[in-house]
Amino acid sequence: MGFDPWLVIIVLIMVVFGMVMVYSASWDVSWRLFGDPNRLFLRQAINLLIGLAVLAVASRLPLRWIRASALPIISFAIFALMAVLILSVGDGPKRAFLNGSIQPSEMAKLAMIIYLAVWMESKEERLMEWGYGLIPLVVMIGLISGLILLQPDLSAAITISVVALVMFYLAGSPLIQTITIALGSAGIGLLLVRVSITGRQRWTEYINGLVNVDDASYHVKQSLQAFNSGGLFGRGLGASREKFGLLPAPHTDSVFAIIGEELGLMGGIFVLFLFAFLVLRGFRIARQQPDRLAMLLASGITFWIGIEAFVNMAVLLGMIPFAGNALPFFSYGGSSLVTNLAGIGLLLNVSRRKPLESKAEQNVKTLSVSRGNRRRRVSRVSRRRSSRRRR
């Protein structure tokens, strides 16, 4: 079928392993909420079937269709982000439809990657101009991140900003523009932390926890307790004690801590290896692409999944301030699972492309490094394609 075989294998292992851990971590919560220990697991199984169907479709779509649908996709994502703010009732967070079943912010992450990949490809060399590159990018990041911050969901907003910045750099933006966006985003993030009650509390708990673990947040302390009790090889699959009302959200944000408790340090290292291998394969696929659209799409999806996994695991180990990121393919949640599988489908789609096919379509833009002036260069598009666009 032309897909990258190692990527298929690693994703299948993660999906199966993730379903096992979802059941182990969720049956007590499911019993307490619904009186049925299998309820949440069955929901996740349905989410998995939907995600696999989406993966199959995304893996076979021609890239020209993806290019044509980029604007409708990002427009729908913006509409969904606005709708969830308007239609949600109550004074709590406004992040999802249907009692948490559909989270527009998860869809917005992938939609943003698709749109930016198409947009950056279309700008070609003009992407280096401030008026055609930096300023429109800042406006788009500000719009999407601003709507997500109103929910509020600081971690999702930061994820989108970081992924967009990395894609902008890989597309060949001048270093000064990349640094400008990075410093500006860091300044805005610091301001949000300072003015937000939740942000200040999480930052204070993080700093205090670095000095004395007893002063860390309750969530982090219980997570570290789970890792500590798991030891080297764990207490055994299904034998976690922290999931019985001690560790918050054991089947969603904290599933990595359950893995550490039940399967020990070896289990945690195995999960880390799975994500590291997936990231390596993803960037290898991106590096092999002879055109910029495929390269940016593969790079953005790979970095997005990798950063989500890193943040989730680092938070539970007390390495960075607390954030509510899910662990891709392992955490319970339909929006996260389906969106991640859709991203993998696009990555598999890109892996099927061969240099000859790309040349036939005359997409000959490649990313390379020039040692002469130490700046990245994107090769010029062929004269035939350029003249066709002028007509």
Image (cartoon, rainbow, N blue to C red):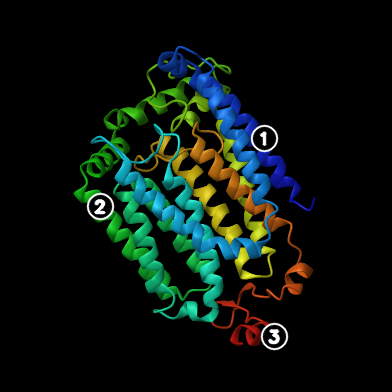
The residue to which callout 1 is attached is 13
Please tell me which of labels 2 and 1 falls first in the chain.
1
The quadrant in which the C terminus is found is: bottom right
Q: Residue 384: which disc?
A: 3
Task: Indicate whether 158 appears above or below 167.
Answer: above
Report x, y in % for residue 1. 80, 50
Report x, y in % for residue 266. 59, 29
Q: Quadrant of residue 373?
A: bottom right
Q: Residue 192: which disc?
A: 2
Q: Are marks 2 and 1 in contact (CB under 8 Å)?
A: no
SS label for mark 2: helix
In this view, the residue in front, 89 or 47, is: 89
Please state the total of marks drawn on the protein image: 3
- Local packing at callout 1 (Cα closer than 10 Å; few below 14, some 14-19, many 20+) is few
Report x, y in % for residue 330. 54, 33
- Local packing at callout 3 (Cα closer than 10 Å; few below 14, some 14-19, many 20+) is few
Residue at 25% in and 49% down: 193
Q: Are marks 3 and 1 in contact (CB under 8 Å)?
A: no
- Local packing at callout 2 (Cα closer than 10 Å; few below 14, some 14-19, many 20+) is some
Task: Indicate whether 282 appears above or below 329.
Answer: below
- Label 1 sits on what residue type? Ile
